[in-house]
Image (tube, rainbow, N blue to C red):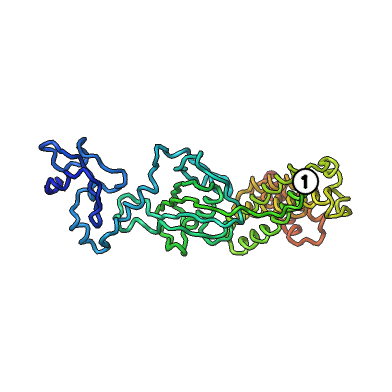
Amino acid sequence: PALPQLPRPLLQSSLAMWHGLVEANGPAHIPPGAGLSTVHSAFEKKSVFSDDLEQILPVEVLRARPSAGIGLPPPDRLLRPLIAPTGGVGEGPLVDISSARDGSLTKAVLSDPKSHGERVSQGSTVVVTITVASAEQDAMSSTRLLHGPKDHEWVLGSGARCDLIEMTVASMYVGESCRVLCKDPELYADAGLGVVPMAGMQVEYALRVVRTDRLQKQSFCECGLSVLAAAVEHAQGERREAAARLREGRDRIALLKFRSIVDELEAAISAEDHGSSECREESGAGAADLPSSSPCGLACTARKMRREVVAELAGCFLRLGRWEEVCRSCEFVLAEDPKSALALMRRGQALLRLGQVSEALHDFEAVLGVQPGSADAARNAEYCRKALARGAARQLD
């Protein structure tokens, strides 16, 4: 239908001005017959608008809406500057930010990478500007904005925010802005933000990291030992936090934290300059006899902790149904500790899910060789034997 004919002076203002709820911005002169077509070349629309029609509605019409507030712009006027790229920087390629790194959740970076600061770390306090909106373009502008824009402060990895926010911020840098679209209520629902799960609804999160505190790790002296000691101390605290997230059922957040711990220990071990090959030779049976404060003793402690955390990482993958990742994580552990009952058990469970019954039986029997009293290993081994027997019987038939 044709748009109503409005007074021409409404469009003849060359100034951008707020009239309570509407911003008018047009050329100084409009050719005769141009009417009010929003697609006419003489009418330059501002990018802050996401609803073309509202650009030409009179102020009185907008103020008459039940949800209108005099002096406050409609929600879309707030969302667009935060979501649309500014300063000539367009959206970059989609970045995988899922905890399992399976592409189930991606972000589009809106800011210039050259302006980014330090990387955000697990366990650090962060301040993030959060805006949440319904991604349904046909919805009324008054109902699209679900939260924000508002600054929020919390400890990353504490579970204070929803999984989507935790996973996204864990991948960000200070000063970075990004956009995330999501349809999974388990990821985007956040009671603290007033974002409730709704079937079939896609939401759009706009996030910007304002600042973060730098993790303060104890520094004893200018040697590699202090780096490793600080990493081990920090990893112990993060392991407790990750275990707490598991008890809460926040598997994805726990997975993020375990990954972060492994990466931190890897970096600290690589930076260790104290006879690495010598320490690795002593990391087996004789490792328990090394003083924990000695360079090699500390290195062995870090490697042992890394194995334990990777085994816990495998447990997260197991709960998330990522069977191949379970096997890879367990193989890393078993390469350093072939008698790890936990890694053998979890790899056996994953192999069983993958249909590799013979290989799973081998792992369960290996667990029984290390822990003869393991009821779970005995039960799983018996299940595998019966499954193999059934398969053999079918082949004979």
Residue 114 placed where, x, y %?
51, 38
Residue 54 placed where, x, y %?
23, 50
Figure check: 134 above or below 33? below
- Badge 1 marks a residue whose secondary structure is loop
Res. 358 in view? no
Figure check: 309 above or below 85? below
Residue bearing mark 1: 223
Q: Residue at x 82, y 59 (%)?
A: 372
* Front residue (pair 359, 395): 359
Q: Where on the picture, by quarter, is residue 73?
A: bottom left
Q: Quick check: 41 left or right of 331? A: left
Residue 187 placed where, x, y %?
49, 55
Q: Residue at x 77, y 46 (%)?
A: 223
Residue 122 placed where, x, y %?
61, 53
Figure check: 45 above or below 340? above
Q: Quick check: 364 left or right of 285? A: left
Q: Amino acid at mark 1?
A: Cys
